[in-house]
Image (cartoon, rainbow, N blue to C red):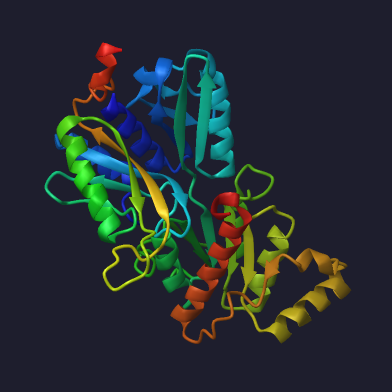
Amino acid sequence: MTKPFYCQLQQFLDEGLTVAVATIVQVKGSTPREVGAKMIIHPYGKHVGTVGGGCGEAEVIRAGLDVIADGQPRLVRVDLTEPISMQSMGVCGGVLDVLIERWGPEETEAQNNPVQAEV
Amino acid sequence: MMRAIAAALAASAERREAVALVSVVQATGEFLPALGRHLVVWLDERTPLGDLQLRDLQPRLLEEARTALRERRHARLDYRTEAGAITLFVEVQPQPYHLIIAGAGHVAAPLAVMASLCDFSVTVLDDRPQYANRERFPTADRVIAGPFREELRKLRGDRPTFDPNTCIVLVTRGHQYDVDLLLEVLDDPVAYIGMIGSRRRVRAVYELLERERGIPRHKFDRVHAPIGLDIGAQTPAEIAVAILAEIIAVLRKQSPERS
């Protein structure tokens, strides 16, 4: 019933927007969401989906905005293993690896990888 | 290219067909040019979309990606050569499970809504058009009004049996319909069959079928009846929660996904 993830992504690209897509590719321990969970980071904050919410997700959103700006894919490690206290950010206790990539309407795959030219 | 890839994935989602997106998590050495590239893989032999420039490794990747698709679980692949290493993530967008709800009564209505929310493809079937209609089931993918057994057979189509992607919930207004439909699908390798009815009633039905039709008792072992997890549900909506929770438990625990 919810709009399929890639239909939403396609719609953004059709509207001419450049977004970042974050995907959980590996987890260790207890995490708020599973491997394969995805999120679209929208340049003006209309994000779609969730990689777990809270401060961990805020970190992913910040990294996603950097990815939108420079096009460099990033693998971000979100660590929720801090000791339990009133100040601690994570509540789940695990670690997630999140792959973040830029998706834009005019994006060719080579542009996504500026490093490639020098290699 | 990214746009074509998004379009292909969106089209597969709309067609409810299984598809995998292969992304590059990390790459070194000769695999560096693959960073930021993607490959879309389908279960059939259709040409994959995109290019990871993996050359000799491509056939192996396709095989492993299709295995992941068949097993309905994401996969992480590590390839290493003398000249570099690459880590790939195979994101599987599986075909949604098909939930057939026989009976369009008070439990079926909330069950259809919640199952849609959980990404099931939902078919509702009843022989009473005043119940089996779009107004009562706005979120369902298909609503069929017609004779139970005949329509269920039609849903099976040309295939000899319903496949393991199918879940069947028998909640018709009369136990005789539930039992009739149960007999129709008893030998089909579906993922889930549940039938409403009290423990006593269900036991009596099984005994009767064993005695009068010679159906061995063990054939009923996989039927979930009384239907639903025992959460003390009382209202129709609560019973729908219990049924859907049971289906999710059966589907998730059978797959290695969460291990």
Q: Residue at x 17, y 51 (%)?
A: A46
Q: Is residue B17 left or right of residue B182?
A: left
Tell me if residue A14 comes above or below residue B251 in the rendering: above
Residue B34 screen position, x and y as percent:
37, 21
Residue B149 as seen in the image, left or right of residue B42: right
Dividing the picture into quadrants, the one containing residue B51 is: top left
Q: Is residue A27 visible?
A: yes
Which residue is the extreme one toward the left? A44
Count the marks: 0
Quarter of the picture containing the C terminus of chain A is: top left
Q: Position of residue B129 (x, y in %)?
A: 45, 68
Point 60% across, 46% down: residue: B157
**Residue at 37% over, 20% down:** B32
Camera-side residue of A19 and B8: A19
The percent coordinates of residue B114 (x first, y second) are 42, 67
A110, B130: nearer the viewer: A110
The image shows residue B168, relative to residue B19, as above or below, that is: below
Image quadrant assignment for residue B174: bottom right
Residue sitting at x 58%, y 74%? B228
Which of B27/B153 is in front? B27
